[in-house]
Image (cartoon, rainbow, N blue to C red):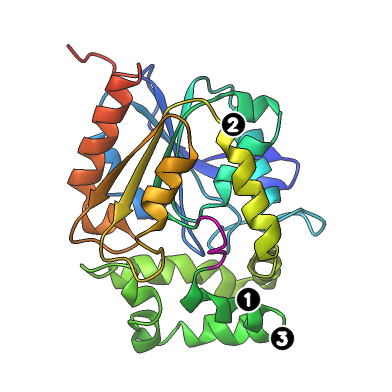
Amino acid sequence: MSRVELSAGPVDYQDTGGDGPVVVFCHGVPMNEQVWRKVVPLMAGYRCVLPTLPLGGHRTPMRPDADLSHRGVAALVGEFVDELGLEDVTLVLNDWGGGQFLLLDRSAGANRIGRLVLVACEAFDNFPPGPAKAMAVVARIPGGMLALVRLMRLRAVRHARRGYGGMSLRGIPDAVLRDWFAPADRDPAIRRDFAKFAVSAPGRRTLLSWFERLRTFDRPVLVLWATEDPLMPREHGPRLAALYPHARLVEIPDSATLVPEDQPECLAAELRAFLTESGAAARGAV
């Protein structure tokens, strides 16, 4: 694991290296880079970069004054890309959809994004998704986040169908789930960061206005939407594809929110085809 110091604090990341086209994979809440563990091995010929974002599963706390709102974390993704000097980046989002807001800025990092891939993620006014709204309520209560992460010590709670157990039809391995919640369980500063993010979603009107502004993004976009997702409305897939001027939609059957968990081979195949057709073929591809 490598680390880069950014304005908000240290961000750990994995980097497969190489001189292939760059794909930056972002995760959800409160996850880490392990959500992509089945997909990265299928991306030979690409440089895969996986930051562990401060969304509650990060292992090192951010600075106390860090902006961990959706726009703040999106800007941090741009800063990360810029600091590493990555060019013509394909940004891939799953679950957390706030990374799209990077495209609203005229920052150096935003200018480095060459393509966008949206995999069953938050969109429009679905911030946070319905079943996750309780987390924002809990985060506002003193001691609420501690109670939440302590509850996640219970296997039955970790795998509850109305919670993380419903994000994958195949089931998230228990070791992975425990790893996602362990940092917030042991470190109050991580819980502080987690709570800051959890309460940061703006109102519906603001969210919809931001999405209207995304219509100006003129680079290729691939929307991969799960057909059996309890968190991200199925109609948001076509709606996103219609929003972006150069987007196309592919629906992924037999999958819930975590498509990298349920359908990694299908996801990787669609991603590679999109990259090839948009001028970012794998290094060494014929």
Magenta residues, start to end: 123-128
Q: Amino acid at mark 3?
A: Ile
Q: Position of residue 2 (x, y in %)?
A: 52, 38
User: Gap between marks 2 and 1, in whole Å?
Assistant: 31 Å
Q: Could you say whether the residue bearing mark 1 is in a helix, strand or loop?
A: helix
Q: Could you say whether the residue bearing mark 3 is in a helix, strand or loop?
A: loop
Say left or right for 132 vs 68.
left
Closer to us: 124 or 59: 124
Q: Residue at x 33, y 59 (%)?
A: 258
Check residue 24 for magenta coloring. Answer: no
Which quarter of the figure is the C terminus placed in?
Answer: top left
Say left or right for 34 vs 45.
right
**Residue 93 seen from this side:** no
Closer to us: 278 or 90: 278
In the rendered structure, which disc, 3 or 1, sits on the residue that comes first in sequence?
A: 1
Residue, disc 2:
216
Say left or right for 21 vs 99.
left
Closer to us: 166 or 1: 166
Residue, disc 1:
136
User: Gap between marks 3 and 1, in whole Å?
Assistant: 9 Å
Q: Amino acid at mark 1?
A: Ala
Looking at the image, which residue sits at the far right?
A: 65
